[in-house]
Image (tube, rainbow, N blue to C red):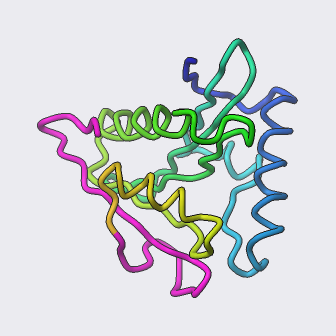
C-alpha cells in the first residue's frame, strides 16, 4: 500500500467519495451530516490523500486548514472490503505526520455519535485524540462527537 496526494480528478476517487457521502446520508440526519463533497475537497486549504493498493483506492482522508495552527481531519474512509486491515491506521499516522510538517499545532475532527462510528472513535483515541467541545463553525449536536489532538512540533507528530 502507498499513500498519494490526490488531485481529485479521476473517476475512481469520485466514485469512492460518492459512496462515502451516500453512506453518511443513510446513517446521519441531514442537519448533522458534515461529509464534504468533491467540490468542497478541491478548495484551497484542503490536502487530500488516497491510499492505493495495486492502484486500487482502499482509503482516503483529508486535512482542511482552519487557521495557521489548527487543521481539521475530514473524509476518512476505508473501503468496506478492507476495514480492520490497517488502512485507516496507516493513513491516520501519515496525516498526523503531514499536519506536523505543515506547521499545525492541533488537529481536530467531527465524527458521529452513533454505534456505527464506534470503531472510528476508538481509532482516534488510539492515536491520541481526546474529546472536546465543538470547534470552528460546529455547534453542539447529539449526533456528533468532537475530538482533538495537540501535535508536538519539536518532537515530530508521529503517533
Q: Residue at x 74, y 74 (%)?
A: 28
Residue 2 image position (x, y, % from top left): 55, 18
Identify the residue at horizontal 20%, vertical 34% (top origin).
156
114 or 19, which lies in front? Answer: 114
Which sits in the foreground, 43 or 92?
92
Report if residue 157 lies within the magenta region: yes
* Above or below, 140 relative to 41: below
Tell me the residue at 87%/29% (across/down).
11
* Left or right for 66, reference 80: left
Please identify the quadrant where the N terminus is shown: top right
Determine whether 134 is above or below 119 in the image: below
Q: Which residues are magenta?
A: 131-159
**Magenta stretch: dominant SS?**
loop
Residue 62 lies, in percent from the top left, at 56, 44
Q: Residue at x 80, y 59 (%)?
A: 23
| Residue 119 versus residue 132 in the image, above or below | above
Residue 152 falls left or right of residue 102: left
Is 73 displayed left or right of 53 in the figure? left
Inspect the magenta stretch and tell me whether residue 47 lies in it.
Answer: no
Indicate left or right for 134 with 32 as reference: left
Quadrant showing the C terminus: top left
Q: How many marks?
A: 0
Image coordinates for residue 117, horizontal then vertical, percent: 59, 64
Residue furthest to the left in view is 154
Amino acid at each position: 500500500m502507498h499513500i498519494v496526494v490526490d488531485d481529485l480528478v479521476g473517476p475512481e476517487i469520485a466514485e469512492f467519495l460518492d459512496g462515502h457521502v451516500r453512506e453518511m446520508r443513510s446513517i446521519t440526519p441531514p442537519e448533522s451530516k458534515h461529509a464534504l463533497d468533491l467540490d468542497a475537497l478541491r478548495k484551497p486549504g484542503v490536502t487530500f490523500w488516497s491510499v492505493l493498493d495495486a492502484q486500487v483506492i482502499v482509503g482516503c482522508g483529508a486535512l482542511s486548514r482552519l487557521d495557521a495552527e489548527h487543521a481539521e481531519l475530514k473524509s476518512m474512509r476505508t473501503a468496506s472490503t478492507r476495514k480492520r486491515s490497517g488502512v485507516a491506521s496507516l493513513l491516520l499516522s501519515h496525516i498526523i505526520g503531514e499536519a506536523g510538517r505543515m506547521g499545525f499545532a492541533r488537529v481536530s475532527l467531527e465524527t458521529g455519535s452513533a454505534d456505527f462510528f464506534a470503531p472510528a472513535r476508538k481509532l482516534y483515541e488510539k492515536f491520541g485524540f481526546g474529546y472536546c467541545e465543538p470547534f470552528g463553525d460546529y455547534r453542539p449536536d447529539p449526533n456528533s462527537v468532537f475530538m482533538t489532538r495537540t501535535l508536538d512540533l519539536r518532537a515530530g507528530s508521529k503517533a
